[in-house]
């Protein structure tokens, strides 16, 4: 039984769209392959004795499409995070000010 795992990828922010593009290229190829396999399985449905084989082929196509859907969803999540970062960049100066308050001046009143 296969288990799903999370992986991480480190890249520069400006390279992120290109990295997502690379992740999507195999999806496109698999979708084309699945479209061809679906067309083939469908065309054999009228042939005697092929229905059982077509069911096996259709199940494989569905499983592959599930995997592709997950990959597309992962890419969408990455791009949503990228878009959020671009449209609402974190306030680095404010964060630094909150972490390091200005030094206090202490006077000795005697």
Image (tube, rainbow, N blue to C red):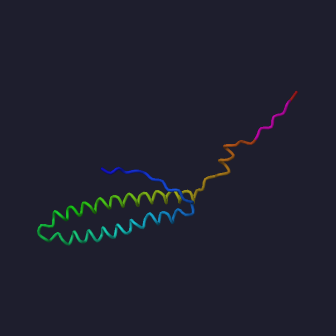
Magenta stretch?
Answer: 103-108
96 sits left or right of 57 in the view: right
Frontmost residue, 24 versus 2: 2
82 sits left or right of 93 in the view: left
73 sits left or right of 11 in the view: left
Frontmost residue, 60 versus 88: 60
The percent position of residue 101, horizontal first and vertical second, equals 71, 42
The percent position of residue 34, horizontal first and vertical second, equals 30, 67
The quarter of the rendered structure image containing the C terminus is top right
Frontmost residue, 95 versus 47: 47
Magenta stretch: dominant secondary structure: loop
Residue at the location (45% across, 59% down)? 76
Residue 33 lies within the magenta run: no
**45 over 88 or under it: above or below:** below
**68 over 102 or under it: above or below:** below
Q: Quadrant of residue 36?
A: bottom left
The percent position of residue 39, horizontal first and vertical second, equals 25, 71
Question: Residue pushed farthest right?
Answer: 110
Q: Quadrant of residue 109?
A: top right
Residue at the location (26% across, 68% down)? 38
């Amino acid at each position: 039984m296969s288990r799903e795992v999370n992986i991480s990828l480190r890249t520069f922010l400006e390279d992120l769209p290109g990295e997502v593009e690379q992740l999507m290229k195999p999806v496109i190829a698999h979708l084309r392959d699945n479209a061809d396999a679906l067309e083939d399985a469908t065309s054999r449905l009228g042939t005697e004795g092929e229905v059982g084989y077509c069911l096996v082929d259709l199940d494989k196509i569905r499983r592959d499409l599930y995997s592709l859907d997950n990959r597309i969803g992962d890419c969408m999540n990455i791009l949503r995070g990228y878009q959020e970062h671009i449209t609402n960049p974190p306030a680095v100066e404010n964060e630094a000010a909150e972490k390091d308050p200005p030094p206090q001046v202490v006077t000795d009143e005697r």
